[in-house]
Image (cartoon, rainbow, N blue to C red):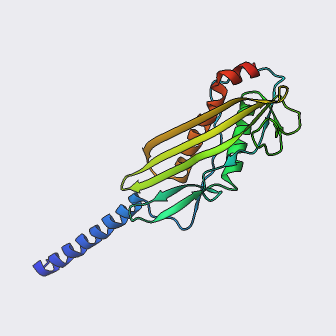
């Protein structure tokens, strides 16, 4: 038979274990900070519907310049409930990331891609021929904020690009397009989800290029 003192001691221990469990669960759900930068795999996501194009068109894609004023591989920041932060990074540089995604977007629309030298986005500076149209540009923003609290992680993305299109035959700039895409949503934290949301935002921005009326007339 249990004595009142023994019962009280067991109850105290049980409460202590429960409190410790709840505290551990709190930090787990809030998302404990990982050590060092968090690497995300960002990729272009092809659309379900593609623009009809001429099979003879070739687009030269120049390196898209990173004008964000940030470290070249940083694409965001993750903050957890304790206040600890981690940089979100890409393999290589953001300039390479966006340039590769743009090339993938051009190919996904059935257009051949031509590798070109870096372009200063002037008619006089257009690299040697071998393409019908030349695309270059600047990255104004490519960023993901991830803030974790108990039971959810809030994600906010911002993608803004300046795209410049030149005509090889006419040796002139035919279009300057400012494109942008933002997404905000609450999710359960995972690296894969962070990568998916930023991939979606970047892809949505790039798709705006192919909706431009001037470009549509040139590629049909």
| Drawn side of residue 125 relative to residue 160, left or right | right
Q: Residue at x 83, y 26 (%)?
A: 170
Q: Quadrant of the C terminus?
A: top right
User: In this view of the protein, which residue sits in the foreground, 78 or 117?
Assistant: 117
Residue 133 sits above or below residue 9 on the image: above
User: In this view of the protein, which residue sits in the foreground, 146 or 95?
Assistant: 95
- Res. 56 image quadrant: top right
| Drawn side of residue 192 relative to residue 72, left or right | left
Q: Residue at x 31, y 64 (%)?
A: 22
Residue 217 sits above or below residue 88 on the image: above
List x then y, in percent, for residue 142. 58, 47
User: In this view of the protein, which residue sits in the foreground, 19 or 165?
Assistant: 165
Q: Residue at x 56, y 40 (%)?
A: 201
Q: Residue at x 39, y 58 (%)?
A: 29
- Res. 175 image quadrant: top right
- Res. 121 image quadrant: top right
User: In this view of the protein, which residue sits in the foreground, 193 or 90?
Assistant: 90
Q: Quadrant of the N terminus?
A: bottom left
Q: How many marks?
A: 0
List x then y, in percent, for residue 49. 63, 24
List x then y, in percent, for residue 184. 45, 42
Residue reaching furthest left?
A: 4
| Drawn side of residue 158 relative to residue 7, left or right | right
Residue 171 sits above or below residue 32 on the image: above
């Amino acid at each position: 038979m249990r004595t009142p003192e023994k019962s009280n001691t067991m109850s105290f221990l049980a409460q202590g274990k429960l409190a410790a469990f709840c505290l551990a669960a709190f930090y787990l759900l809030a998302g404990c900070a990982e050590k060092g930068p968090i690497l995300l795999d960002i990729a272009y996501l092809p659309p379900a519907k593609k623009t009809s194009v001429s099979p003879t068109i070739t687009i030269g894609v120049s390196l898209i310049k990173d004008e964000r004023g940030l470290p070249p591989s940083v694409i965001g920041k993750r903050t957890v409930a304790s206040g600890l932060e981690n940089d979100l990074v890409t393999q290589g540089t953001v300039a390479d990331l966006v340039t590769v995604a743009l090339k993938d977007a051009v190919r996904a629309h059935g257009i051949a891609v031509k590798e070109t030298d870096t372009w200063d986005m002037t008619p006089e500076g257009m690299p040697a021929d071998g393409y019908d149209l030349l695309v270059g540009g600047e990255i104004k923003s490519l960023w993901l904020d991830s803030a974790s609290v108990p039971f959810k992680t809030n994600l906010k993305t911002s993608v803004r690009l300046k795209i410049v299109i030149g005509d090889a035959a006419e040796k002139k700039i035919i279009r300057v397009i400012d494109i942008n895409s933002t997404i905000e949503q609450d999710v359960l934290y995972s690296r894969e989800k962070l990568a998916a949301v930023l991939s979606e935002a970047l892809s949505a921005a790039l798709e705006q290029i192919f909706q431009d009326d001037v470009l549509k007339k040139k590629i049909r």
